[in-house]
Amino acid sequence: MVRIHFHKVAVFGERGGAERHRGTYGTLCLMKHHTRHPRKLPEIFRPLLWSYQFDQMDPDAHRKEIIVNTINYGDLKHWRWLTGHYGRAGVRRVLTSVPVTEIRPHVQKLVGMYFGIADEAFRHAPRGPH
């Protein structure tokens, strides 16, 4: 178990002269297994990642492959796992860094709505050689 001591500080006042009010001392206890990400993917991902060596896939090291394949071929339970593991911002960061052609066309609009990504934020490939 990990113990974290905290002291809550609230700031009151206007921009020019803020006053500090100190209060609420306490201890927050966290279990170690909640503070670290698992190093293995759940078995529900095996069918989505059939072309990879599933047992050797690390959720952090293979983040891009896991997110892109899950978005393209997974269902809502997979998307919820992505959100819980990487966070919406983490998934959004990966999806906006890969070319939009890696995301299946009929999934792009739903991905944009679910993860809050505007169409302009997707990385589109240039049309011409210049």
Image: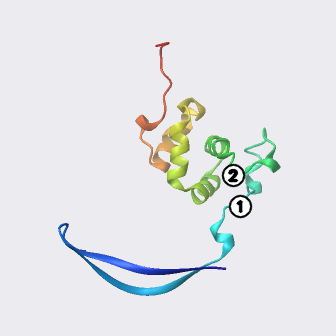
Check disc 2 and give the amino acid type.
Answer: Pro
- In the rendered view of the protein, which quadrant contains the N terminus? bottom right
Front-most of 36 and 66?
A: 36
Instruction: Label 1: state its secondary structure.
Output: loop
CB contact under 8 Å: marks 2 and 1: yes
Residue 60 lies left or right of residue 92; in this view the side is right
* Residue name at image x 73 percent, y 57 percent: 39
Total marks shown come to 2
Instruction: Label 2: state its secondary structure.
Output: loop
Front-most of 109 and 42?
A: 42
Q: Which mark is residue 38?
A: 1
Q: Quadrant of residue 29?
A: bottom right
Residue 90 percent across, percent down from the top left: 54, 51
CA distance separating discs 2 and 1:
8 Å
The residue where tag 2 is placed is 59
- Give the vertical position of 115 relative to 109 (above or below): below
Mark sitting earlier along the chain (2/1): 1
* Residue name at image x 46 percent, y 47 percent: 113
Front-most of 59 and 1?
A: 1
Q: Quadrant of residue 33?
A: bottom right
